[in-house]
């Protein structure tokens, strides 16, 4: 076993997952490639969404990949930081909105 | 940001042999990545051979008013290699007798060669179809004696191709030096004012985008759209086309890659993005690069790596179209820079 759970060089080997399940791996990568093509959203917009989600998912491979991809698409640092704040805001909002549930429960039990 | 060339700093990487060693050792020697020769052999594209000459690219000297981080020429104010008028005369003879349709002047800052204007005037008389000067823009604002360059270019119907790494000040100045963005914007506005870059104008103004760090350029058409929108909205600037160019891992960009520990990842990115259809149109197959002292190379990058053409003809004074056509192109791992993604050349994407 390697000494760490994450190795940056493993990102390059992502495609290898197809070796142990060719059909599913190929279907996944075809789908993945299609998703990121220019469509109703530009490839640049998709890259920023992916960057924000990479952070909320806390996937180090995805953060490396989409930081680079954003740079390649001419995205500025300010745009990247704003994008991950959007992710962070949804994350914290998702936590706090459950506060209503807590309030409902407390009010029911001790209202 | 460095203020001196690698050569002036006596850097190990000022030595082209050292650069070639780095490009052949490590990941390529151990077989982690295929050499460029092996890669193009996979698709039966080795050896690469020169086709008919279309573009004559002349480097009139390595002197420049800027010291950009990623310069493949290692140009700067301290570089003294300058093409003489005698060598220019030899180039003119070739221009008049060759079928090449494009003349491409580069440097350094070509305008800093004391015989630059004489050369442009003489070359313009040869009636070449597309006459390019690669201007760094800031030179126009650098000194009073250059202020009239937009008018001079217009008079000779020169096609201007200029570097512009980004439409924001921060990213541009990071790569090209403090103040470069503001001066470039001013120069572009002056070029627009005399008619350059306006839609339907014959006065061609194209911009070159090359990434500001260890990553590849994005899609040329999308980048062009973004550049046009931002430059028009923010500064009222117009231009014709954007050429997206990949940084090749040589000279100061190689130095940067190694110092920032990005070299191996960058080479992986280039090899992974290898595109056989870009190989068909690499610029070395239709271009000849002439150095400041008249020697011939397959491209400006090979010139900087001191890899001369593989031909009996080595110098512009012995130029012979028949002998040069069909020559085998000299390659190394830096060539992956021209075949990644949509490909890269001095005219932008090729695939």
Image (spheres, coloured by chain):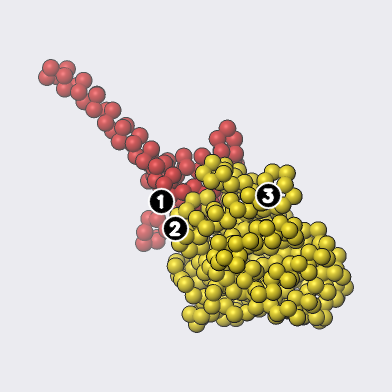
Chain colours: A red, B yellow
Which residue carries the number 2 mark?
A8
Name the chain under label 3: B
Given residues B30 and B282, the one toward you in this image is B282
| Residue B116 in view of the camera | yes
Q: Residue at x 36, y 59 (%)?
A: A4
How dense is the environment of label 1, judged by Cα within 10 Å: few (below 14), some, or many (20 and up)? some
Asked if the residue at tag 2 contacts the one at tag 3, i.e. Cβ–Cβ closer than 8 Å, the answer is no
Mark in front: 3 vs 2: 3
Q: Which mark is residue B195?
A: 3
Given residues B98 and B138, the one toward you in this image is B138
Asked if the residue at tag 2 contacts the one at tag 1, i.e. Cβ–Cβ closer than 8 Å, the answer is yes
**Does residue B278 lie above or below B76 as drawn?**
above
Q: What is the distance, in whole Å, between disc 1 and disc 2 at their CAs?
A: 8 Å
- Earlier in the chain: of badge 1 and badge 2, it is 2
Q: Looking at the rendering, in which quadrant would you find the N terminus of chain B?
A: bottom left
Q: Is residue B85 left or right of residue B256?
A: right
Which residue carries the number 1 mark?
A60
> In terms of secondary structure, where does tag 2 sit?
helix
How dense is the environment of label 3, judged by Cα within 10 Å: few (below 14), some, or many (20 and up)? some
| Image quadrant where residue B333 sits | bottom right
> x, y (%) of residue B64?
57, 71
**Does residue B132 lie above or below A39 as drawn?**
below
Q: What is the distance, in whole Å, between disc 3 and disc 2 at their CAs?
A: 50 Å
> x, y (%) of residue B231?
55, 46
Same subunit, labels 3 and 2: the answer reads: no
| Residue B303 in view of the camera | no
């Amino acid at each position: 076993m390697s000494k760490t759970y994450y190795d940056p060089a493993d990102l390059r080997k992502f495609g290898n997952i197809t070796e142990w399940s060719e059909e599913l791996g190929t279907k996944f990568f075809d789908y993945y490639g299609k998703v990121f093509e220019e469509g109703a959203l530009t490839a640049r917009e998709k890259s920023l969404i992916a960057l924000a989600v990479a952070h909320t998912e806390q996937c180090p491979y995805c953060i490396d990949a989409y930081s680079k991809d954003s740079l390649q698409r001419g995205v500025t640092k300010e745009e990247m930081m704003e994008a991950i704040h959007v992710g962070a805001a949804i994350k914290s909002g998702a936590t706090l909105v459950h506060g209503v549930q807590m309030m409902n429960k407390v009010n029911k039990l001790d209202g | 940001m460095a203020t001196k060339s690698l050569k002036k700093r006596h850097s190990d990487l000022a030595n082209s042999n050292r650069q070639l060693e780095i490009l052949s050792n490590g990941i390529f020697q151990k077989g982690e990545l295929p050499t460029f020769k092996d890669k193009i052999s996979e698709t039966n594209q080795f050896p690469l051979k020169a086709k008919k000459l279309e573009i004559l690219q002349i480097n009139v000297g390595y002197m420049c008013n800027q010291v950009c981080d990623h310069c493949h020429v290692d140009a700067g104010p301290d570089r003294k290699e300058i093409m003489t008028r005698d060598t220019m005369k030899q180039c003119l003879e070739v221009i008049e007798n060759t079928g090449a349709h494009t003349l491409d002047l580069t440097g350094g800052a070509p305008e800093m060669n004391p015989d630059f204007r004489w050369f442009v005037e003489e070359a313009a008389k040869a009636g070449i179809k597309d006459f390019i000067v690669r201007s760094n823009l800031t030179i126009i604002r650098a000194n009073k004696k250059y202020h009239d360059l937009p008018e001079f270019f217009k008079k000779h119907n020169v096609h201007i191709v200029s570097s512009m790494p980004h439409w924001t000040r921060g990213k541009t100045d990071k790569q090209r030096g403090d103040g470069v963005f503001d001066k470039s914007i001013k120069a572009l506005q002056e070029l627009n004012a005399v008619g350059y870059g306006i839609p339907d104008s014959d006065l061609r103004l194209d911009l070159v985008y090359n990434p500001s760090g260890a990553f590849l350029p994005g899609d040329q058409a999308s980048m062009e759209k973004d550049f046009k929108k931002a430059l028009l909205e923010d500064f009222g600037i117009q231009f014709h086309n954007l050429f997206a160019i990949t940084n090749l891992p040589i000279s100061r960009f190689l130095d940067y890659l190694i110092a920032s520990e990005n070299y191996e990842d960058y080479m992986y990115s280039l090899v992974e993005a290898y595109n056989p259809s870009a190989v068909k149109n690499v610029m070395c197959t239709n271009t000849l690069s002439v150095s400041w002292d008249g020697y011939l190379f397959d491209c400006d990058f090979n010139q900087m790596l001191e890899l001369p053409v593989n031909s009996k003809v080595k110098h512009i004074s012995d130029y012979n179209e028949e002998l040069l056509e069909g020559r085998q192109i000299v390659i190394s791992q830096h060539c992956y820079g021209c075949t990644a993604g949509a490909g890269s050349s001095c005219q932008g994407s090729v695939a």
